[in-house]
Image (cartoon, rainbow, N blue to C red):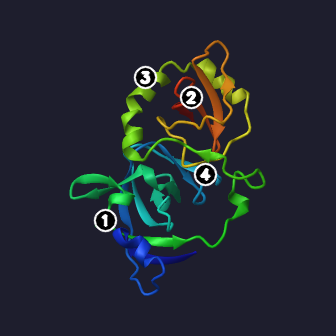
Amino acid sequence: MMTKTLTLATVSALALASSATIAGAVTATAAADINLRSGPGGQYQIDGVILTGDEVEVAGCNAEQSWCQVTSSSGEGWAYAPYLTFDQGGEMKPLSEASAQQITIIEDNGQDEATALGAGMGAVAGALLAGPVGAVAGSMMTGIAAHNSVSDETTVYIQENPVDPVFLTGEPVVGAAVPGEVTLYDVPENQEIAYLNVNGNDVVVERETRRIVYVIR
């Protein structure tokens, strides 16, 4: 790994700068329950979970600002950046809007296939359709209500009937929508919901909207 420090507002312009000063870690807050992964991508193994509202120390992010290397109560690893918020004068903002912060840009020089869930299983199939923090937060209450209808029997059925994972850009969180081309699997006795495995997580989705209503961890 190589690191450079860039002001977030000028990441694009300074991406090739070689004389930037190394900055210390900054604090961010999780806006949703997100995975702590061994590498910067949904294909990497899950090492823990960062819960909504948990604070993490951000050591740096990749140049695309899609994944950040963090230290959390679950340990050290990588978290999906769009669901991290930064304090900007008392207002929590996503990484893309946190222009007053400084962050270390981490250049990934290769993938450790030994820690990858999807090694040899093909490329990313599509993108989760949730927007960043605001779009997911807006559907949280609906997702929580829908989760109340996911019975213990349904959860057990899903765990006892595993399906091959599909690898999508981003992370499976409540409120995110699954692309239309991705196959859903039936849940017995409840035609309103279905399930699949996204990036290593079994998830329950509402069939009509294809939105995730519950992530089984």
Q: Does residue 4 appear left or right of residue 24 in this picture?
A: right
- The amino acid beneath tag 3 is Ala
Say what secondary structure mark 1 lies in: loop
Q: Does residue 173 appear left or right of residue 8 in this picture?
A: right
Cα–Cα gap, marks 3 and 2 = 13 Å
Indicate which disc, 2 or 1, sits on the residue closer to the N terminus: 1
- The amino acid beneath tag 4 is Gly
Indicate which disc, 1 or 3, sits on the residue closer to the N terminus: 1
Q: Residues within 10 Å of mark 3 (few under 14, many from 20)?
A: few
Indicate which disc, 3 or 2, sits on the residue closer to the N terminus: 3
Q: Which mark is residue 42?
A: 4
Residue at left 41%, top 26%? 142
Read off the residue under disc 1: 99
- Front-most of 206 and 27? 206
Cα–Cα gap, marks 4 and 1 = 26 Å
Quarter of the rendering containing residue 204: top right
On the image, the x and y values in percent for residue 33 come to 46, 42
Residue at left 48%, top 81%? 16
Indicate which disc, 4 or 2, sits on the residue closer to the N terminus: 4
Asked if marks 3 and 2 touch (Cβ < 8 Å), the reply is no
Cα–Cα gap, marks 3 and 4 = 27 Å
Mark 3 or mark 2, whichever is nearer to me: 2
